[in-house]
Image (cartoon, grey):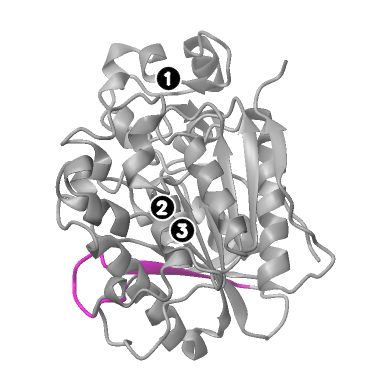
């Protein structure tokens, strides 16, 4: 087994900013509290207006890795010599760019066997984000030669409401299976990985494989299964009706909350729709293995969401593990980042490559240096 650590960064688009991030010195000068990331309030006024474009996954800050990605923008991607990219493949048989996926294959696979697939679904509160950000997560796995990567787009809430988003994701999984032979993919080993809103959608893929009303009729491959074989849920909402029960920087029950916009009305006034959009609702004993990763200081998606989800999965007999990042924020894992990356790598090795030497267990990592 080849174990490797992921290089996590996101594409940065600050071309319109009058103050660029420039050099590492600039980053350090702006990082007033020296926590290794930039909040919006730490940025000069001229750069703040672009913050939402930079913060694609809505984690509330800009990391040094993201800063580095900006400094190298416009250059040839470093993965050009390792990865073959086929972007914007329509899984819905139409020209909607939100119903498309990007396919990434290693130029030097470890062998000629069909490749296990890691399908990534981006975050952004179901109303923002871009599938292109998925490559930064997938790169180290594809570059290893051991996996194929797919980054899935889906309709956002300014275009369609629930269950459109899960209908799209399921159509993408069916497309993968239908085209597996063409691209030398292994249709029996598909992982779904997502963060925040993407974490919610991959958890839904994991728990709703037997829910007919959530299948939808999108695409040409309705004869294929939309089930996935394992799930990595990074801090995704799991129960819409309890999102507002814990401290957060937003009112999740408000009419304009991300959850309310997703289901088409205030959460507490549309309880049936809220339950339909909750992975917790659909748990059954035949759900695939799930790895949940969540920070205790997440100010957007409360940490108890993953605790309750994990507990109910275990009670139902599902193979589930919870990695807790003490003092970790909404994707800000600090010094625990490398350990989280290794945990994800081991999870994929175990469930996509049948490495029986690996045992997944609940873990607690510390995000900050004491």
Query: Which circle, 1 or 2, is nearer the viewer?
Result: 2
**Marks 3 and 1, the one that precedes in the sequence:** 1
Q: Secondary structure at mark 2?
A: helix
What label sits on residue 121 in the rendered view? none
Bin the neighbour count of mark 1 within 10 Å (Cα to Cα): few under 14, some 14-19, many 20 and up.
some
* Disc 2/disc 3 C-alpha distance (Å): 5 Å
**Marks 1 and 2, the one that precedes in the sequence:** 1
* Tag count: 3
Q: Secondary structure at mark 3?
A: helix
Residue drawn at point x = 46 percent, y = 76 percent: 227
Q: In the picture shown, does residue 43 fall above or below 305?
A: above
Magenta residue span: 90-107
Bin the neighbour count of mark 3 within 10 Å (Cα to Cα): few under 14, some 14-19, many 20 and up.
many
Q: What is the x, y in percent for residue 315?
A: 60, 57
Q: What is the x, y in percent for residue 247?
A: 41, 24
Q: Secondary structure at mark 1?
A: loop
Residue drawn at point x = 56 percent, y = 69 percent: 285
Task: Tell me if I can see residue 146 in this picture.
Answer: no
Is 233 positioned to the left or the right of 141 in the image? left
Q: Which residue is mark 3?
A: 203
Q: Nearer the viewer, residue 261 or 194?
A: 261
Q: What is the x, y in percent for residue 348?
A: 66, 63
Residue drawn at point x = 79 percent, y = 59 percent: 359
* Disc 3/disc 1 C-alpha distance (Å): 29 Å
Q: Which residue is mark 2?
A: 200
What label sits on residue 39 in the rendered view? 1
């Amino acid at each position: 087994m080849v174990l490797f650590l992921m290089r996590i960064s996101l594409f940065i688009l600050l071309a319109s900013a009058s103050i660029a991030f420039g050099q590492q010195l600039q980053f350090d000068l702006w990082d007033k509290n020296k926590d290794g990331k930039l909040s919006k309030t730490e940025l000069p006024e001229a750069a703040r207006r672009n913050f939402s474009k930079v913060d694609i996954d809505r984690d509330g800050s800009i990391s040094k890795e993201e800063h580095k990605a900006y400094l190298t923008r416009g250059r040839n991607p470093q993965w050009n010599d390792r990865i073959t990219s086929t972007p914007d493949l329509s899984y819905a048989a139409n020209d909607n760019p939100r119903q498309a996926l990007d396919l990434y294959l290693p130029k030097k696979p470890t062998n000629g066997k069909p490749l296990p697939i890691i399908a990534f679904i981006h975050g952004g509160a179901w109303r923002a984000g871009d599938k292109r950000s998925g490559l930064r997560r997938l790169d180290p796995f594809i570059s290893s030669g051991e996996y194929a990567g797919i980054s899935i787009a889906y309709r956002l809430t300014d275009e369609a409401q629930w269950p459109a988003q899960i209908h799209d994701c399921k159509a993408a999984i069916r497309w993968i299976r239908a085209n597996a032979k063409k691209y030398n993919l292994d249709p029996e080993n598909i992982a779904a990985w997502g963060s925040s809103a993407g974490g919610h959608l991959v958890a839904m893929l994991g728990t709703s494989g037997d829910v007919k009303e959530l299948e939808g009729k999108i695409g040409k491959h309705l004869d294929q299964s939309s089930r996935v074989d394992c799930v990595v849920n990074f801090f995704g909402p799991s129960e819409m009706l309890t999102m507002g029960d814990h401290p957060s920087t937003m009112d999740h029950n408000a009419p304009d909350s991300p959850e309310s916009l997703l289901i088409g009305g205030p959460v507490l006034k549309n309880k049936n729709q809220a339950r339909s959009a909750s992975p917790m609702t659909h748990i059954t004993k035949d759900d695939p293995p799930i790895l949940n990763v969540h920070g205790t200081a997440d100010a957007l998606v409360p940490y108890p969401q993953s605790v309750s989800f994990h507990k109910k999965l275990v009670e139902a007999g599902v193979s589930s593990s919870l990695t807790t990042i003490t003092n970790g924020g909404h994707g800000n894992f600090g010094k625990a980042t490398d350990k989280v990356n290794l945990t994800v790598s081991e999870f994929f090795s175990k469930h996509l490559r049948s490495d029986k030497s690996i045992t997944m267990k609940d873990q607690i990592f510390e995000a900050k240096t004491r």
